[in-house]
Amino acid sequence: MTSTTSSPRLVTVAACQLGPVHLADSRQDVLKRMLSLLEQAAQQGAKLAVFPELAFTTFFPRYLLAERDLDQYFDVEDPSKGGIEQSPNIKPLFDRASALGIDVYVGYAERTIQKYGTHVDYNSSVYYSANANKIIGKYRKVHLPGTVEPRTEPGAVQQLEKRYFRPGDLGFPAFRAPGLVEGALKKSSGIYNATQSTGKGDPIIGMLICNDRRWPEAWRVYGLQGMEILCCGYNTTAFPTTATGHQLDLTPEAAEEMVLLHHKLSCQGNSYMNACFSINVAKTGAEDGNPLVGGTIIVHPLGHIIKEAQTKEDELVVATIDLADCHRPKNTVFAFEKHRRPEHYHLILDRTGVIEPDLL
Amino acid sequence: MTSTTSSPRLVTVAACQLGPVHLADSRQDVLKRMLSLLEQAAQQGAKLAVFPELAFTTFFPRYLLAERDLDQYFDVEDPSKGGIEQSPNIKPLFDRASALGIDVYVGYAERTIQKYGTHVDYNSSVYYSANANKIIGKYRKVHLPGTVEPRTEPGAVQQLEKRYFRPGDLGFPAFRAPGLVEGALKKSSGIYNATQSTGKGDPIIGMLICNDRRWPEAWRVYGLQGMEILCCGYNTTAFPTTATGHQLDLTPEAAEEMVLLHHKLSCQGNSYMNACFSINVAKTGAEDGNPLVGGTIIVHPLGHIIKEAQTKEDELVVATIDLADCHRPKNTVFAFEKHRRPEHYHLILDRTGVIEPDLL
């Protein structure tokens, strides 16, 4: 891995930003909006469409809900009835993707049925490959923000992901998406050339969800698997809160500017430090009066923003990226094998929280 | 650690940016410039002065040098003659700091004498405490960029840190700097109150050097020790190079803009993700025609730049920071003990370089 040039490996990707989804919006209506974005993405030549976190519904962790009211937000993974791709609420998206020849990353609330009818819930995403004609990647959000118990102070904003979901148990498994690269499928007899070293390899994909993007450990675990494209959907409240769930004393404009700065520093900084593209896709706008930031961005491995959404509505952000752009940084400044020193990183595993140094 | 407010803990800090140091410049002349910056910093009320990496000399790793020509760039740590603070080239800086009551971070080339007269060399920094009247922190650069063997292609730019220095062997040890916080020394009988929980604790300091700032592992190891202020000096070439050491095909302006973006994403992103201040200090300008970027910045724990250098010359950047600003992010979005999941981070230690996922 020391050559300095490599053949172009072009992929056209689409960030499918969604505007608000209100409590009263039906799953069918949201699906229709998503199918419309998918259709436009395919028309513009995209081979990958990235949708937000919990794309199909409103961001329900902002509400304290009884068990029976929660059910409607989940898609059930029932081994006896097939995987999530059989869910009537999701299947049409993958069917259409398959017909259009476009891959899909999408976030949803996953309910897994256990023995004796109990269930375990996750904030999940899947990667559906049109070429493989199935789901080839699955991720469960590891870094859940918020609290288990509702905040009780008057005026507190709720963030109940830790109540409704279990932290992801799948780690950060990178995978290859077959046939994404332009020309990869034009090889003799339709068999694509999947050899990375020829510069025609299938892209290495990683998935994160929302708050995960602020955690460099998550990006690095993917980076150590050679990740070239990171897909990340999010629902991010447009103002920072205190530990009691109150808004900071800022104007709405200043608050939103701060949230967007944090979003961009996370996505741009971690893309740069792992020499990968990232496709970061918002559900945005005010959901029943609760503002979510926009800022859907496609980021280059050199850290700059390639393209950014202009609205807080359903909006397509399409770019043709060249995966060969990962090559130089992955083989110079971020040639991990030459520069990393894991012998000095052990605290990252040895402790979860902070232990401060002794007083002098 | 769940309260949302904390008393102010004010510290005035100074980034002491240095303009170029040419081959012909004497150590004495450079020291004079540094003493002048130190003097001004103290006049402006600073309690901490941060100088660049390898501050006392030109950035000599850009040259292929014979052993005998290298000697002049190193300060010798000889156990039989006392520590580096006894070096005649450095001692006047610490003596003056002591008299002015101001702490100093400074980078230098460290030569440690071993048995039988051999030596081991590091790219190091020390933290001199005026209150403790001694060096209380030492760091040896872990992430050395460049190559061991000189690049042989015509026109190649050399970066020989891997040749001249051994990777740091001290890890990332955070420490407390006594008496830095305003009012901390005004307690009864001159004994400062070092109890963190009262909001008057001695600041927790981390040190990095140049290329280290691009490595999130380094910041995180400090973050897990509760770091509040990260000091980092650098000499960063003002254009990116290929693996063969050639400049990318960019205008000088575009090249410098890219390098500054990477610098800022690293410093701002990692300060944000670890909820700490950072003081990032350049040696800058053209050293014998070799351009180094500027961009000396003091960064807030919320990721924004508090203050930035305006020149590529010797320049002081002073700011009064409130360490209490670390409190909210360290106890909400980055409350590590609540959100981190080390069980999924093991690849960070298990492998040094990339292992790509199998082909499908």
Image (tube, coloured by chain):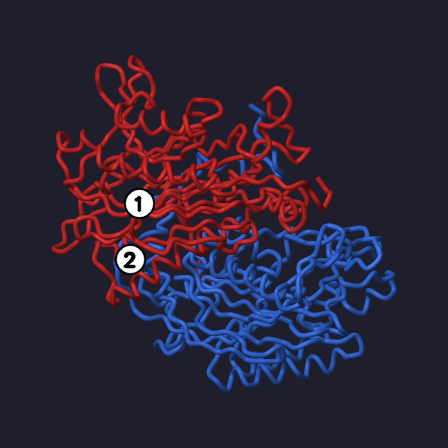
Chain colours: A blue, B red
Image location of residue A84, percent across then percent down: 69, 68
Image location of residue B356, percent across then percent down: 43, 54
Image location of residue B1, percent across then percent down: 70, 39
Q: Is mark 2 on a helix, strand or loop?
A: loop
- In the image, residue B159 sits, relative to residue A11, either above or below, namely above
Q: Is mark 1 on a helix, strand or loop?
A: loop
The type of residue carrying mark 2 is: Pro
The type of residue carrying mark 1 is: Leu
In three-dimensional space, the C-alpha distance between marks 2 and 1, rounded to whole angstroms, equals: 21 Å
Image location of residue B46, percent across then percent down: 46, 39
Instruction: Name the chain under label 2.
Output: B
Q: How crowded is mark 1: few (under 14 residues within 10 Å), some or many (20 or more)?
A: many
Q: Mark 2 points at which residue?
A: B240
Quarter of the figure with the C terminus of chain A: top right
Residue at 23% x, 60% y: name it: B247
Quarter of the figure with the N terminus of chain A: bottom left
Which numbered disc covers residue A22?
none
Q: Name the residue under label 1.
A: B18
- In the image, residue A24 sits, relative to residue B74, either above or below, namely below
> Could you tell whether B348 is left or right of B232 in the image?
right
In depth, the one of A152 and A344 nearer the eye is A152
Residue A337 shows in the view: no
2 or 1: tag closer to the N-terminus: 1
Instruction: Name the chain under label 1.
Output: B
- Where, by quadrant of the figure, is residue B170 drawn? top left
- Where, by quadrant of the figure, is residue A122 drawn? bottom right
In depth, the one of B344 and B162 nearer the eye is B162
Q: Residue furthest front?
A: B43
Residue at 70% x, 56% y: name it: A241
CB within 8 Å, label 2 to label 1: no
Residue at 77% x, 68% y: name it: A73
